[in-house]
């Protein structure tokens, strides 16, 4: 079979790609070997497009004030991707209608399921709507990326300013928290309008595809083949009945240790004994070097991967004005290595984010040798298992950041109690999204009430919000996933429960657990999610009874660190 796709593809405009798509679509395969080689060419073409998309997204995220980068990304969204989507659907039909499809082996079964659901979902009229959704999400990112406050004679990003919430001086914490909340409130109405448009556009996408609700549509779109809404509601129930009581206990102890009559929202980050914040590093460069030292001790293979990323300038970790918020690991399917983007500001949480994103990166490296690039495109329930497990594995090596053992214990206590807090928040965000898209024509008042009810269901009322209600009503707006990747959030909670199981195994047998972890990650998406979890030595189960079992272990570990 002729080589349909060149080794290197330059993508500046749609006309660069159309001849390649034409070749792919016109090729006739008469044997299964031809069919498989054709699929390899398809794989190479889409990997090249994905990499181009990745770099344009990365560049505009690195500097939201870079108009050239923003225009380049917008051009890709408006003039290249819509055409790609149309031709991608044609290729999927060519694959799906081929008699050779019946001969694929088990490692391609998930790919086959994905093609089948994408054919079912695709509607040409939705291409333009999806582009509008991407533009609105980019507008949200632009708004939040430009948020700053003035404090102590300095202009600070929200990520930088949040470091002051760890300060022992309560008046400082309150002042900075209020400034941040006021700044976010200034954009509340505009962000609300963006979200209104997103909800209606997404509802239209679902209706165009023949679905009664966006919730039903997105479950299939996200490829949730191995669980459904019932399991998500089981997760909600588990958080409400198992996680919430532990969280309320943690907060009650925090209030007593701080000697306060009541906890206010600015009292959640500060050390419980009013000690100064932990300072694991002073700069982005130091964060990278200490992380390399950590992996040099943990595992030679992981150290090689992390070192390659540093050498190839694939790490941008420091927060700065104009940089988009958040953090991500973006795979580069042609390069064979990912790019890590984050907003480190010298806090311990940055250490966890760094090891989290490197867990994703190691996943990319470990699955790179699979025959097809699309086989390494794992669902989030697996991808986040890789990253969240790595956060916990790395805790045994935090002496790379702290010379004082007490600081390590204190950091681990914050990490584990943070997991409890995060699971609460995940349930809130997931339940909120379900409500929003179950009631797509709601008004702002109903939305605010729903958010308030959801917060009470999963958090209770451990904090004193008197006089601060106006700030609480829009706290959901800080979660960028709601705007950029709807419903993609509970995956973190599912994976966190898997990661806790892996960490439990790791504490008993670290080498065997790491070996099973690597083996599971090397599978990419050639197995089902439950099979991948089983390969890692854990269960894919987030029912209340299963969560209760893993939380007994977690509570024991937290209790050991109670006075850290």
Image (cartoon, rainbow, N blue to C red):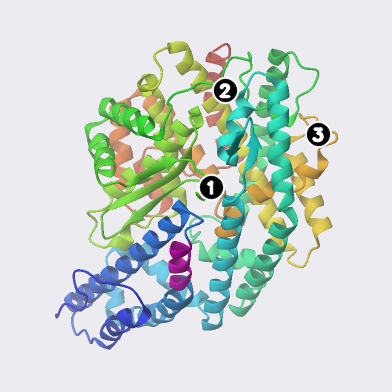
- Mark toward the viewer: 3 or 2: 3
Image position of 450 with respect to 498: above or below? below
Which label was assigned to residue 524? none
x then y, percent, for residue 262? 79, 22
User: How far apart are labels 2 and 1 at the CA level?
Assistant: 32 Å
x then y, percent, for residue 248? 71, 27
User: How far apart are labels 3 and 1 at the CA level?
Assistant: 26 Å
* Residue at x 37% of width, y 69% of height: 112
Instruction: Point out the tag, 3 or 2, that comes first from the N-terminus.
Output: 3
Position of 555 with respect to 267 (left or right) is left
The residue where tag 1 is placed is 325
The residue where tag 3 is placed is 465
The stretch drawn in magenta includes residue 203: no
Instruction: Point out the tag, 2 or 1, that comes first from the N-terminus.
Output: 1
SS class, disc 2:
helix
Q: Residues within 10 Å of mark 3 (few under 14, many from 20)?
A: some
Which image quarter holds the N terminus?
Answer: bottom left
Is 454 in front, or is 541?
454
Is 348 in front, or is 453?
348
What span is in magenta? 67-76
The residue where tag 2 is placed is 555
* Residue at x 73% of width, y 23% of height: 171
SS class, disc 1:
loop
* Residue at x 77% of width, y 40% of height: 456
- Mark toward the viewer: 3 or 1: 1
Position of 397 with respect to 388 (left or right) is left
x then y, percent, for residue 119? 46, 77
């Amino acid at each position: 079979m002729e080589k349909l796709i060149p080794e290197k593809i330059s993508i500046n405009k749609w006309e660069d790609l159309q001849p390649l798509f034409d070749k792919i679509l016109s090729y006739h395969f008469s044997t299964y070997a031809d069919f498989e080689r054709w699929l390899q060419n398809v794989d190479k073409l889409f990997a090249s497009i994905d990499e181009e998309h990745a770099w344009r997204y990365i560049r505009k995220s690195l500097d939201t004030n870079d108009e050239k980068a923003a225009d380049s990304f917008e051009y890709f969204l408006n003039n290249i991707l819509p055409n790609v989507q149309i031709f991608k659907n044609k290729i999927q039909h060519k694959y799906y209608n081929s008699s050779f499809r019946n001969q694929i082996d088990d490692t391609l079964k998930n790919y086959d399921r994905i093609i089948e659901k994408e054919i079912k979902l695709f509607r040409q009229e939705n291409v333009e709507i999806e582009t509008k959704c991407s533009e609105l999400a980019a507008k949200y990112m632009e708004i939040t990326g430009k948020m700053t406050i003035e404090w102590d004679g300095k202009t600070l990003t929200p990520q930088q300013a949040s470091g002051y919430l760890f300060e022992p001086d309560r008046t400082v914490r309150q002042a900075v928290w209020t400034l941040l909340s006021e700044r976010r409130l200034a954009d509340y109405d505009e962000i609300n309008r963006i979200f209104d448009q997103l909800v209606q556009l997404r509802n239209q996408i679902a209706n165009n595809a023949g679905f009664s609700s966006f919730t039903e549509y997105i479950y299939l779109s996200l490829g949730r083949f191995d669980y459904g809404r019932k399991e998500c509601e089981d997760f909600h129930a588990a958080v409400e009945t198992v996680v919430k009581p532990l969280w309320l206990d943690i907060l009650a102890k925090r209030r007593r240790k701080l000697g306060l009559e009541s906890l206010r929202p600015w009292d959640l980050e500060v050390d419980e004994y009013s000690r100064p914040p932990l300072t694991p590093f002073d700069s982005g460069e130091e964060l990278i070097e200490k992380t390399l030292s950590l992996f040099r001790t943990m595992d030679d293979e992981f150290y090689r991967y992390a070192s390659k990323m540093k050498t190839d300038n694939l790490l941008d970790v420091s927060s700065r004005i104009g940089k988009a918020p958040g953090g991500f690991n973006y795979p580069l399917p042609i390069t064979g290595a990912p790019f890590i983007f984050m907003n480190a500001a010298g806090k311990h949480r940055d250490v966890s984010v760094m090891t989290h994103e490197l867990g994703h990166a190691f996943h990319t490296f470990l699955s790179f040798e699979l025959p097809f690039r699309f086989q390494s495109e794992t669902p989030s329930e697996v991808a986040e298992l890789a990253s969240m497990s790595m956060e916990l594995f790395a805790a045994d090596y935090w002496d790379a950041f702290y010379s004082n053992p007490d600081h390590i214990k204190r950091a681990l206590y914050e990490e584990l109690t943070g997991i409890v807090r995060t699971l609460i928040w995940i349930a809130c965000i997931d339940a909120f999204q379900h409500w929003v898209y179950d009631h797509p024509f709601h008004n702002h008042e109903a939305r605010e009430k729903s958010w308030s009810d959801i917060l009470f269901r999963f958090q209770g009322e451990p904090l004193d919000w008197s006089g601060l209600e106006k700030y609480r009503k829009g706290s959901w707006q800080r979660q960028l996933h709601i705007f950029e990747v709807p419903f993609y959030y509970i995956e973190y909670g599912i994976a966190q429960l898997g990661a806790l199981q892996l960490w439990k195994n790791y504490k008993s047998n670290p080498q065997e657990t790491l070996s099973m972890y690597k083996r599971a990650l090397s599978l990419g998406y050639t197995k089902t999610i439950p099979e991948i979890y089983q390969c890692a030595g854990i269960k894919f189960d987030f029912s209340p009874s299963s969560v209760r079992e893993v939380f007994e272990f977690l509570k024991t570990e937290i209790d050991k660190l109670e006075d850290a």
